[in-house]
């Protein structure tokens, strides 16, 4: 993106109202689609009946409840029919509205129902039920199969998703979640109790669940998996496409899965949420080939960790990430597996054969996928990869069977990073940066020692306003460019604008984390926020919910998606935020404390009303006389960094 272009889109966006939801447009490649006939495989789970039984496990006892009730009503547009049973367990709480579901009205508690056309037959209801308990899922699965026998079975689980940590929570059951071990046990026990070997289809209508860890752990229990690697907009999947089963109960699992994936894309496009969505249909019967190839690759990477880690670090820094946040405490550290392996294979020739084998196995397992313009490199699977061991969660080691030794490779990678000698760590040759300012903005440049060039993984700029008390308040970051000629020259550009959010009554300064690259049309930016429920006055000692505003802009500088995602700290899960209009949003910006740790502070003690369509963007240029601090940072794969900086008065 050129400097002039960025200024142009900033000017264009001034006073644009925020849209209520967002994600992405699609990459629909017919070559990615394979039916059972094309693959030469039949994937029957086995049953005494005919047609399909779809079981929907709706963990709606969260702030996603309104979206999930809308999903139930979508299912009611189709309903059960001859050869098709549509069965759901829907759990609701008392705190998220009274939306009516079909002819059931509104309720608190759980209902086990068979969904008909615009109606539902209540089979059993419960005052309270913990859907974060694996026994609840196991019982629902076995009972649903036994009471609704069919030739084919599908299970769809809907709630917040957290990638490998699982799904959930159930808020009225002490925020209980289903982790990956519990999902394995629950699905396995439910199938055993029902006398069924496998599900034909397992789906997660949730954020972040199309991961290598999820797919390889659950492969024994289903033939196909549908899931997203990226955050999902609140509307989730389009369940009206289930009419393909009503029309043809003999439909194959790949035809049904493809319809659900494409339906999600269509609904996202109709809802204006088509920026960075992802969804893939995976053939879990081919996961063993991915496991084998990944095992060979990780073994090679561990063996050559000292040599290949610099390449891996650069690949990771440039790779698409999902569930990312400027605040690392809210980052999921999930990166695209296919794109990562492809880059490693190109840059590290001594492991290129192993990398190519992984890519071939992934391509063979991906039956169908879609992605938006902000996620063109979506391969169908992501994998956990924190850039440093500071953010690595030890719970990852509890994943069944340490998938393909990936945790062992991460240990080796972090070990190689910690072993980088001081003389090979990034060090700028001067203490001060070179800064030039013109009508376009500010360019900052520096040179670091060339001995460390091979270890450098990432470069970026971050900029701060200097207060009257001398405190630095960081208001944004974006990538910088390391010249590829080995000279150690690095540069970054800042157009001297700030981001303000306004509810047209009050205005608050916000943090802008901008992401763009030369190969991807448009760009995205993320804004950290705190949400205070109605009646709560914004203050550091008051409870609030972490919110991430994610905005996508296309190559014609049009805003194509704006979504507010809620982050649940206890589970690490994300889902589209359901905010009360009279609640308050407070943007947060970054400072560093005495220990040089990041601290995110509010920029307003008043807040902005969370009536999202009324919130506007403003991108004012910094006023003359403003004192600005700007850093140019270079970081190696071990997390060692150096920077040059400048203080300017505009």
Image (cartoon, rainbow, N blue to C red):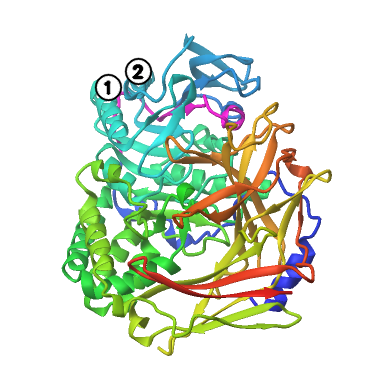
Residue 301 vs residue 372, the one in the foreground: 301
Task: Name the secondary structure under disc 1.
Answer: helix
In which quadrant of the rendered view does residue 472 lie? bottom right
* Mark with earlier residue (2, 1): 2
Task: Name the secondary structure under disc 2.
Answer: helix
Residue 144 vs residue 81, the one in the foreground: 144
Residue found at the far front of this picture: 469
User: With 492 as the anchor, is 38 left or right in this view?
Assistant: left
Q: Which residue is mark 1?
A: 194
Note whether residue 21 is visible: no
**Alpha-carbon span between mark 2 and mark 1:** 7 Å
In which quadrant of the rendered view does residue 531 lie? top right
Up/down of 157 relative to 487, above or below: above
Magenta-colored stretch includes residue 339: no
Note whether residue 185 is visible: yes
Q: Residues within 10 Å of mark 1 (few under 14, many from 20)?
A: some
Q: Which residue is mark 2?
A: 143
Residue found at the far right of this picture: 505
Up/down of 4 relative to 626, above or below: below
Part of the protein shown in magenta: 44-71
User: With 400 as the anchor, is 248 left or right in this view?
Assistant: right
Residue 115, horizontal then vertical, whole percent:
53, 21
Mark 2–mark 1 contact, CB under 8 Å?
Answer: no
Q: Image quadrant for the C terminus?
A: bottom right
Residue 607 vs residue 612, the one in the foreground: 607
User: With 528 as the anchor, is 153 left or right in this view?
Assistant: left
Residue 194, horizontal then vertical, whole percent:
27, 22
Q: Image quadrant for the N terminus?
A: bottom right
Up/down of 175 relative to 104, above or below: below
Up/down of 458 relative to 207, above or below: below
Magenta-colored stretch includes residue 45: yes
Residue 630, horizontal then vertical, whole percent:
60, 71
């Amino acid at each position: 993106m050129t400097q002039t272009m960025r200024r142009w889109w900033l000017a264009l966006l001034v006073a644009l109202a925020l849209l209520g939801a967002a994600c992405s447009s699609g990459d629909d490649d017919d070559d990615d689609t394979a039916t059972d006939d094309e693959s030469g495989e039949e994937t029957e789970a086995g049953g005494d009946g005919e047609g399909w039984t779809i079981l929907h496990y709706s963990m709606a006892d969260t702030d996603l409840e309104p979206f999930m009730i809308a999903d139930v009503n979508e299912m009611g547009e189709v309903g059960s029919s001859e050869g098709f049973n549509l069965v759901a367990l829907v759990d609701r709480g008392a705190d998220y509205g009274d939306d009516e579901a079909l002819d059931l009205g509104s309720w608190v508690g759980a209902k086990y129902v068979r969904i008909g056309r615009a109606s539902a037959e209540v089979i059993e209801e419960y005052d309270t039920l913990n859907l974060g308990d694996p026994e609840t899922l196991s019982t629902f699965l076995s009972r649903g199969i036994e009471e609704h026998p069919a030739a084919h079975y599908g299970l769809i689980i809907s709630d917040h998703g957290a990638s490998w940590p699982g799904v959930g929570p159930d808020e009225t059951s002490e925020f209980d979640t289903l982790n990956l071990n519990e999902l394995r046990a629950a699905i396995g026990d439910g199938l055993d109790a029902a006398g069924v070997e496998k599900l034909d289809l397992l789906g997660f209508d949730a954020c972040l669940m199309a991961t290598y860890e999820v797919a390889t752990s659950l492969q024994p229990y289903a033939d196909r998996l549908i899931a997203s690697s990226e955050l999902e907009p609140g509307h989730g999947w389009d369940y009206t496409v289930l009419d393909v089963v009503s029309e043809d109960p003999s439909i194959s699992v790949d035809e049904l899965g493809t319809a659900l994936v494409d339906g999600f894309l269509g609904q996202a496009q109709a809802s204006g949420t088509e920026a960075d969505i992802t969804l893939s249909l995976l053939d879990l019967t081919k996961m063993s080939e991915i496991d084998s190839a990944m095992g060979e690759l990780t073994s090679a990477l561990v063996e050559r960790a000292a040599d290949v880690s610099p390449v891996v670090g650069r690949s990771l820094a440039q790779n698409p990430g999902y569930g990312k946040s400027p605040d690392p405490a809210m980052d999921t550290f999930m990166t695209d597996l296919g794109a990562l392996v492809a880059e490693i294979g190109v840059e590290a020739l001594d492991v290129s054969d192993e990398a190519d084998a992984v890519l071939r196995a992934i391509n063979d397992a991906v039956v169908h996928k879609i992605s938006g313009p902000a996620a063109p490199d979506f391969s169908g699977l992501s994998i956990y990869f924190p850039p440093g061991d500071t953010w690595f969660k030890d719970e990852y080691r509890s994943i069944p069977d340490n998938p393909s030794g990936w945790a062992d490779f991460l240990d080796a990678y972090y070990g190689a990073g910690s072993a980088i000698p001081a003389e090979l760590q990034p060090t700028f040759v001067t203490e001060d940066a070179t800064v030039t300012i013109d009508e376009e903005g500010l360019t900052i440049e520096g040179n670091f020692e060339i001995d460390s060039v091979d270890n450098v993984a990432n470069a970026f700029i971050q900029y701060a306003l200097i207060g009257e008390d001398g405190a630095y308040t960081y208001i944004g970051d974006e990538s910088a460019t390391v010249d590829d000629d080995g000279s150690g020259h690095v540069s970054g550009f800042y157009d001297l604008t700030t981001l303000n959010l306004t509810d047209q009554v009050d205005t608050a300064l916000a943090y802008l984390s901008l992401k763009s690259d030369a190969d991807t049309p448009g760009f995205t930016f993320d804004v950290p926020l705190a949400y205070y429920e109605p009646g709560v006055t914004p203050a550091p000692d008051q409870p609030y919910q972490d919110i991430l505003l994610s905005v996508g802009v296309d190559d014609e500088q049009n805003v194509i998606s704006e979504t507010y995602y809620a982050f649940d700290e206890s589970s690490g899960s994300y889902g589209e935020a359901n905010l009360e209009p009279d609640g308050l949003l407070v943007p947060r910006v970054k400072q560093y404390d005495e220990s040089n740790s990041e601290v995110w502070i509010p920029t307003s003690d008043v807040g902005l009303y969370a009536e999202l369509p009324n919130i506007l963007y403003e991108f004012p240029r910094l006023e003359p006389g403003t004192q600005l601090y700007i850093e140019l940072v270079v970081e190696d794969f071990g997390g060692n960094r150096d920077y040059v900086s400048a203080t300017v008065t505009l």
